[in-house]
């Protein structure tokens, strides 16, 4: 009887393990694609156009009106604060030259989520 229980437990653990491995790798793929999509929006001159003002790694012809976007996870450990900066920079600095992308609906909420994922890993 004990052996049967042990065999059953092993079977359940193996099945769960087999189910979880693909789930974890597809989550990693999703995170990667969010970063890629966010990059496309951030670099699009008709989208975020972040390069007009910010140096961002791999971006061509950056402006320097805003600070270089580097070491973001260290400087913005709270991703929500980073998103808030992108959503409405004027809430943090009323004289900001940075367009309030969320407040003024320049980007959709979903686009801001994607851009945040991209900027966070810079
Ligand atoms: C017209 C210029 C301009 C554009 C376009 C712009 N920003 Fe900014 N950004 C600034 C300025 C200037 C600052 C400095 C803080 C301030 O004055 O509000 C800033 C600050 C930031 C910060 C905070 C950086 C820090 O070190 O504290 C982040 C993050 C940021 N911008 C992200 C973005 C993203 C993402 C985009 C594109 C979706 C973008 N910015 C587009 C001008 C701009």
Image (cartoon, rainbow, N blue to C red):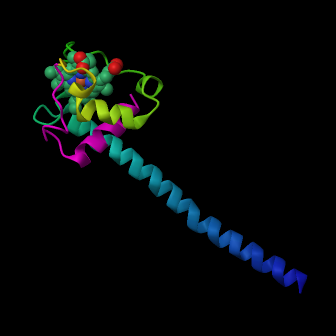
Q: Quadrant of residue 104?
A: top left
- The location of residue 100, given as percent across then percent down, is 18, 31
Residue found at the very far bottom of the displayed protein: 1
Task: Say if the magenta span includes residue 99.
Answer: yes
Q: Is residue 26 above or below residue 118?
A: below
Examine the rendering and report whether any part of residue 115 can be seen. yes
Name the image quarter holding the N terminus.
bottom right
Q: Nearer the viewer, residue 7 or 104?
A: 104
Q: What residue span does the magenta drawing correspond to? A: 97-122
Residue lying at 57% horizontally and 60% vertically, measured from the top left = 21
Rendering coords of residue 65 (x, y %): 19, 13
Q: Find residue 78 and report its horizontal and vertical position in percent.
A: 44, 33
Question: Residue 37 or 93: which is nearer the viewer?
Answer: 93
Q: Residue 93 in the image: x percent, y percent?
A: 24, 20
Residue 70 falls left or right of residue 21: left
| Residue furthest right as drawn | 2
Count of labels in the image: 0
| 74 left or right, relative to 13 | left
Q: Quadrant of residue 50?
A: top left
Q: Quadrant of residue 121?
A: top left
Q: Is residue 58 visible?
A: no
Q: Is residue 67 above or below residue 79?
A: above
Residue located 76% across and 73% down the image? 10
Q: Residue at x 25, y 48 (%)?
A: 110
Please tell me in which quarter of the rendered image ligand 1 is found: top left
State the quadrant of the C terminus.
top left
Measuring 50% from the left and 55% from the top, which residue is drawn there?
25
């Amino acid at each position: 009887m004990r052996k049967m229980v042990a065999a059953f437990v092993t079977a359940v653990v193996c099945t769960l393990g087999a189910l979880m491995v693909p789930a974890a790798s597809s989550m990693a793929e999703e995170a990667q694609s969010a970063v890629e999509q966010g990059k496309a929006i951030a670099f699009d001159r008709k989208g975020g156009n972040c390069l007009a003002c910010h140096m961002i790694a791999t971006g061509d012809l950056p402006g320097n009106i805003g600070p270089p976007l580097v070491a973001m996870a260290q400087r913005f450990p709270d991703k929500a604060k980073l998103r808030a900066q992108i959503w409405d920079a004027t809430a943090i600095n009323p004289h900001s030259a940075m367009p309030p992308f969320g407040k003024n609906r320049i980007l959709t909420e979903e686009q801001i989520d994607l851009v945040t994922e991209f900027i966070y890993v810079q």
